[in-house]
Image (tube, rainbow, N blue to C red):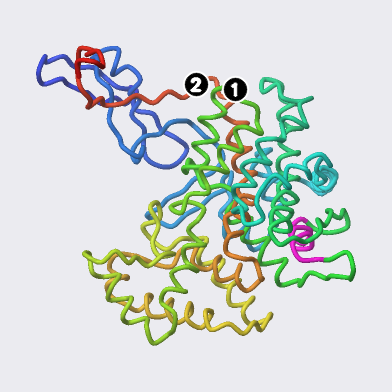
């Protein structure tokens, strides 16, 4: 059978070219447009890259219409039920699930890289106490290359692996210390006897003066949140990591760029926006008013945490985290009117024909924001926790890119709409 092609014709000149059609293992076919500029002297135009595949990847697959999310071919539902964040992280980095010996070795390596250089403690002191934790994250992560510069050859597989362990293992410590610094509290060092999620919560909330035990339900809920956020195809922050990494920047610089991109309220800041929205609504009796405002196209109010750019059906991660959300609220028995408000809003939206027709279901950000609040994590730390979870996805995508036979520095083109040519006029004649 002949290879499939599509024909692109310039109606002005009548010139036509045949473009190869490429097929992945699953998902839409891809038209190879690399010859368009060479043959026709034209660029393609796709604002937001909504219809453009910028790379080939084996890591994550999303079917937005069916509500499917796969990590290396494994459905997220099965991983959430049977696996853990660290095991899913091993899967994303190495491409296969580990056996018992491999997993034990992986966990041990992660634990032994959680400490950060003592010199970094001085960096925190350079920030204002009220600095947003994500500002601290961008700065501290970017500075890691100044302390760990013995393994920065991006063409060396072993160097990439060492740097990946360092980023992945140290991020929870960096994040927890950002919070502690903002509170004027002493830094709590990581402990090798604690599990990954448990260790982060311990560094967040423990004090040297007394014993602190992390709630098992809190540990499970956070582990699930980290797993569900571990990777999500070529989203804005992942694409940023790939673009920065394509310059052969060191891994700490590339990941720092991803942290900065994740900070945006339209990306990693969405769960924080959910809590801000709930605070705006205020009470359960105000829900009808704000539902009406959300349905008014001329009103600027938007229901945050509903719908998703990719998922045109229910977000599969939301189904999983919804169960965890109810477990956390029930087991921790936290008294907070906002939880009643969130659950009432969820119930109303799931029954409202406006939202059902448009498939505006609660997404993962809606429930994660509620869980974070229940765990005592302040809303300016929500995106920081997202950063911890997404770090393994960024690292895996970066590592994959550097091994791609078609690797090139990223260089998008543009449709120029400015002045064609203007003569320079000396300042005294203007």
At which x and y percent is residue 140? 68, 41
Q: For residue 54, which quarter of the picture?
A: top left
Residue sitting farthest toward the bottom:
285
Residue bounds of the magenta highlight: 196-206
The verdict on residue 170 being magenta is: no
Q: Is residue 1 visible?
A: no
The tag earlier along the polypeptide, 1 or 2, is: 1
Q: Is residue 145 visible?
A: yes
Image quarter where the N terminus lies is: top left
Q: CA distance from mark 1 to mark 2?
A: 8 Å
Q: Is residue 128 above or below residue 116?
A: below
At which x and y percent is residue 7? 22, 23
Which residue is disc 1 drawn over? 248
At which x and y percent is residue 373? 60, 71
Q: Are marks 1 and 2 in contact (CB under 8 Å)?
A: yes
SS for callout 1:
loop
The structure residue drawn at horizontal position 47% and vertical position 30%, both measured from the top left corner, is 55
Q: Which mark is residue 409?
A: 2
Q: Which mark is residue 154?
A: none
- State whether the magenta stretch is mostly helix, strand or loop: helix
SS for callout 2:
loop
Position of 149 with respect to 325 (left or right) is right
């Amino acid at each position: 059978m002949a290879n499939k092609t599509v024909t692109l014709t310039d109606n002005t000149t009548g010139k036509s070219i045949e473009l190869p059609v490429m097929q992945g293992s699953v998902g839409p076919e891809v038209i190879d447009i690399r010859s368009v500029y060479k043959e026709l002297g034209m660029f393609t135009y796709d604002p937001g890259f909504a219809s453009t595949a910028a790379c080939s990847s084996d890591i994550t697959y999303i079917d937005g219409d069916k509500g499917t999310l796969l990590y290396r071919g494994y459905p997220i539902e099965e991983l959430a039920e049977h696996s853990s964040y660290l095991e899913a992280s091993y899967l994303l980095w190495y491409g296969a699930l580990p056996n018992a010996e491999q997993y034990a070795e992986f966990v041990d390596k992660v634990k032994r890289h959680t400490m950060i250089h003592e010199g970094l403690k001085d960096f925190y002191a350079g920030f204002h106490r009220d600095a947003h934790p994500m500002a601290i994250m961008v700065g501290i992560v970017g500075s890691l290359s100044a302390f760990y510069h013995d393994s920065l050859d991006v063409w060396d597989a072993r160097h990439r692996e060492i740097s990946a362990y360092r980023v992945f293992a140290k991020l929870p410590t960096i994040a927890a210390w950002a919070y502690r610094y903002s509170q004027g509290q002493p830094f709590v060092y990581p402990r090798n006897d604690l599990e990954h999620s448990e260790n982060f919560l311990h560094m967040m909330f423990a004090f040297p003066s007394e014993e602190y035990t992390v709630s098992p339900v809190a540990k499970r809920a956070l582990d699930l949140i980290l797993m569900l956020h571990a990777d999500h195809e070529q989203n804005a922050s992942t694409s940023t990591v790939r673009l920065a990494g394509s310059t052969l920047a060191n891994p700490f610089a590339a990941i720092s760029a991803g942290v900065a991109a994740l900070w945006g309220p339209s990306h990693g800041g969405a769960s924080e926006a959910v809590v801000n929205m709930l605070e705006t609504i205020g009470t359960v009796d105000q829900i009808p008013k704000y539902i009406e405002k959300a349905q008014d196209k001329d009103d600027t109010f938007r229901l945050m945490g509903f719908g998703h750019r990719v998922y045109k059906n229910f977000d599969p991660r939301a189904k999983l985290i919804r169960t965890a959300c109810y477990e956390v609220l029930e087991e921790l028995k936290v008294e907070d009117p906002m939880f009643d408000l969130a659950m009432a809003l969820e119930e109303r939206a799931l029954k409202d024909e406006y939202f059902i027709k448009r498939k505006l279901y609660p997404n993962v950000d809606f429930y994660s924001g509620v869980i974070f609040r229940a765990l005592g994590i302040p809303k300016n730390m929500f995106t920081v926790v997202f950063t911890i979870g997404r770090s393994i996805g960024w690292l895996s995508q970066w590592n994959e890119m550097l091994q791609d036979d078609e690797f090139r520095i990223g260089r998008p083109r543009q449709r120029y709409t400015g002045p064609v040519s203007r003569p320079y006029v000396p300042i005294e004649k203007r």
